[in-house]
Amino acid sequence: HAKHDGGGRAIVFRQEMHSTASSRLDLESQLRRALDNRELRVYYQPVVDIWTEDVVGFEALVRWDHPERGLILPLEFIPVAEETGMIIPIGEWVLRQALTQAQRWRTEAPRALNPWIAVNVSTLQLRDANFVGMVADVLMQTGFDPTALHLEITETGLMNDIGANLKTLHALRTLGVQLSIDDFGTGQSSLSYLSLLPVQTLKIGCCFIAGLGGEDPHASPIADVIVSVGRALKLTVIAEGVETMEQLQELRRIGSPLGQGFLWSQPLPSEKILEWLGTRLPRE
Ligand code: C2E
Ligand code: MG
Ligand code: MG
Ligand code: MG
């Protein structure tokens, strides 16, 4: 019996490995063509003032509209893009797309909406020698106000090789761009490093918001701590992944100034954003 099971399992295992490897190769070669084939999309998620719930900005989030599989989320293809170097052209495309769109909103959108735009940056992009020049070019070509561009870098990526990253961050600041640490609290940065970084915003990751406002009032003290750190270092704080009114109330109590999450809106294609803004008009 043991022999039979073992053999059977070995065969199943090998088949799975094979199909995983080949679908991974498929994904890789399809991703190489995705840009040229215009299959990538940028979705936008509003960031709101936690008290007034007015929109203050948007985060650009990339999706891949795969011809057979439909919409693929970044967690599945960004790692592939990073391993293949495709993240460099993809990242530039997302930035240009987002700034072009945001420039349109800043000139055409209703009311006094003058949103900033946040774009995610992989550390592989940060380490690319042309990155700062590329950002400067795209800002110039789109005419977008550099101070309304927020670049988001994950804490883990930043802290890894901080010396090399610091030079780039300072160069980006010289352009006028704002810098945010994404998923703050999930990495290993010490507070002394944080005070050295030329960043303006901390984003509290979804996992620290999920426990807020539930049965246990102390379920997630981390969000509270991050807000305090932000206040002490004079940084803005954005709570990500806000889904419920209870979480919103808890964030108001803690004093997080800004929020982002399904409570207000999922990430949406640009044309749906104007529609969404329209449905919010009666509340004001
Ligand atoms: P992130 O930058 O931390 O983005 C926030 C993620 O949380 C997004 O997932 C968003 O859809 C999701 N989210 C927003 N509100 C809620 C909520 O209320 N509940 C829950 N459960 N989730 C919420 P998404 O779009 O799948 O992106 C995942 C990650 O992929 C991003 O995390 C970011 O690290 C990366 N990413 C996305 N776009 C880009 C890009 O253009 N370039 C790079 N380098 N990375 C990107
Ligand atoms: Mg982000
Ligand atoms: Mg984010
Ligand atoms: Mg995040």
Image (spheres, rainbow, N blue to C red):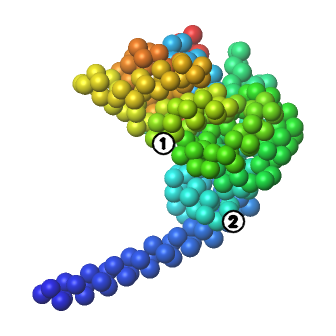
Q: Quadrant of the C terminus?
A: top right
Q: Position of residue 192 (x, y in %)?
A: 55, 32
Of labels 2 and 1, the one closer to you: 1
- For label 1, count other residues whose C-alpha is less than 10 Å away and answer few (under 14), some (14-19) or many (20+): few
Q: Quadrant of the N terminus?
A: bottom left
Q: Answer whether residue 126 is visible to the viewer in this image.
A: yes
Q: Position of residue 219 (x, y in %)?
A: 30, 28
Residue sitting nearer the eye, 235 or 163:
163
* Residue 15 location, quadrant: bottom left
- Please state which amino acid type lies under the numbered disc 2: Arg
Q: Answer whether residue 60 is visible to the viewer in this image.
A: no
Residue sitting nearer the eye, 37 or 207:
207
What number is the disc on residue 33?
2
| Mark 1 CB near ligand 4 (8 Å cut) | no
Residue at 70% in and 15% down: 111
Residue at 55% in and 41% down: 155
- Please state which amino acid type lies under the numbered disc 1: Gln
Residue sitting nearer the eye, 35 or 81:
81
In-image side of 156 versus 196 (left or right): left
Residue most extreme to the top = 284
- For label 2, count other residues whose C-alpha is less than 10 Å away and answer few (under 14), some (14-19) or many (20+): few
User: Do callouts 2 and 1 mark residues in contact (Cβ within 8 Å)?
Assistant: no
Q: Position of residue 266 (x, y in %)?
A: 51, 35
